[in-house]
Amino acid sequence: MIQIQAYLVEKKKVSFNDLFSERWTRNELIATFLAILELVRTHFAWVRQDKQFGEIVIENGKRISITISQKKIPSKIHRI
């Protein structure tokens, strides 16, 4: 979840598909989805999908988490 937060602080928005490497597992997909739900619940991010079956975009919410702003954000974020 912290990797997604750091990515959103740096880039402001990210496609759901961009969070994964070329080879991903079912567990990675589920863990990432649950992490995004938690970020939305805490108002750190919001999610939009412009059309049915369209691209899912996660955007940085208005509230910046204190835990992420106090940590040094790595210059390169590793994909999950």
Image (cartoon, rainbow, N blue to C red):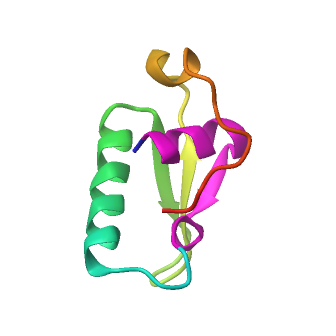
Specify whether residue 10 is painted magenta. Answer: yes
* Highlighted range, magenta: 2-20
Q: Give the camera-side residue of 52 and 29.
A: 29
Residue 9, by quadrant, is top right
- In the rendered image, residue 56, in percent from the top left (x then y), is placed at 51, 68
| Foreground pick, 44 / 19 | 19
53 and 78: which is toward the camera: 78
Q: Residue at x 37, y 51 (%)?
A: 36
In this rendering, the answer to whether 64 lies above or below 18 is: above
| Horizontal and vertical percent position of residue 68 | 51, 25
Tell me the chief SS of the magenta region. Answer: helix
Asked if residue 70 is positioned above or below residue 52 in the image, the reply reads above
- Quarter of the image for residue 50 reads bottom right
Q: Residue at x 71, y 46 (%)?
A: 11
Looking at the rendering, in which quadrant would you find the N terminus?
A: top left
Name the residue located 45 percent from the left edge and 81 percent from the top edge.
Answer: 52
Residue 60 among magenta residues: no
- Residue at 48 percent of width and 15 percent of height: 66
| Left or right of 25 in this view: 45 | right
Residue 22 in picture, x, y percent from top left? 55, 84
* Residue 60: image location, x then y, percent: 57, 40
